[in-house]
Image (cartoon, grey):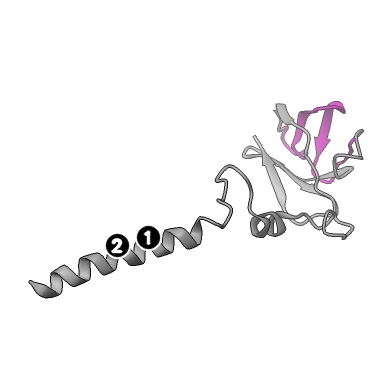
């Protein structure tokens, strides 16, 4: 019983000391991005590099044509460029090269969709 009476007041004294020490520190606002996270989210361009972030325009498949003995073709609509007839190997130049990569290359047209590669970047997009 005597140990309990000593420990409890010591705990409260320790807690009061810790709270008093932290009262001087500015409180973190949970709605603000911490400097550590801000540094991690910096794009190469904002960090001084030459890379740019691109936005792909909306691409919609309007129709597909598969005739016997001929390569498949697709009618696609590219936002800002218009409606185009494309086949495997077609190149689509985008009109807004400032915000977009500038060139899309159609790699495959099949019943599964149109596989498009963004020139200069790794990766492909399948439009269905």
121 is within the stretch colored magenta? no
Which residue is outermost to the bottom?
A: 3
Locate residue 102, reporting x and y percent: 89, 42
Locate residue 3, reporting x and y percent: 14, 75
Crowdedness near tag 2: few (<14), some (14–19) or many (≥20) residues, C-alpha within 10 Å: few
The secondary structure type at the circle numbered 1 is: helix
Is residue 45 placed above or below 98 in the rendered structure? below
* Span of residues in magenta: 67-94
Is residue 45 placed above or below 115 in the rendered structure? below
Q: Is the C-beta separation of discs 2 and 1 under 8 Å?
A: yes
Q: Nearer the viewer, residue 24 or 52?
A: 24
Which residue does the numbered mark 2 point to in the structure image?
Answer: 12
The secondary structure type at the circle numbered 2 is: helix
Q: Quadrant of the C terminus?
A: top right
Q: What's the distance in space between the residues labelled 2 and 1, CA to CA?
A: 6 Å
Q: Nearer the viewer, residue 10 or 34?
A: 10
Query: In the rendered view, does 32 fall on the left or right side of 7?
Result: right
Q: Quadrant of the N terminus?
A: bottom left
Q: Nearer the viewer, residue 39 or 123?
A: 39
88 is within the stretch colored magenta? yes
Which residue does the numbered mark 1 point to in the structure image?
Answer: 16
Locate residue 54, reporting x and y percent: 81, 44
Is residue 30 placed above or below 40 in the rendered structure? above
């Amino acid at each position: 019983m005597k140990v309990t009476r000593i420990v409890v007041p010591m705990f409260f004294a320790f807690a009061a000391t810790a709270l008093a020490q932290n009262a001087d520190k500015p409180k973190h606002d949970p709605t603000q991005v911490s400097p550590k996270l801000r540094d991690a989210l910096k794009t190469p361009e904002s960090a001084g590099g030459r890379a740019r972030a691109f936005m792909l325009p909306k691409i919609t498949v309007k129709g597909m044509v598969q005739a016997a003995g001929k390569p498949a073709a697709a009618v696609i609509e590219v936002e800002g460029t218009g409606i185009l007839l494309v086949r495997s190997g077609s190149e689509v130049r985008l009109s807004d090269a400032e915000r977009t990569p500038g060139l899309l290359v159609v790699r495959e047209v099949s019943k599964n969709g149109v596989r498009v590669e963004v020139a200069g970047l790794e990766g492909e997009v399948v439009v269905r």
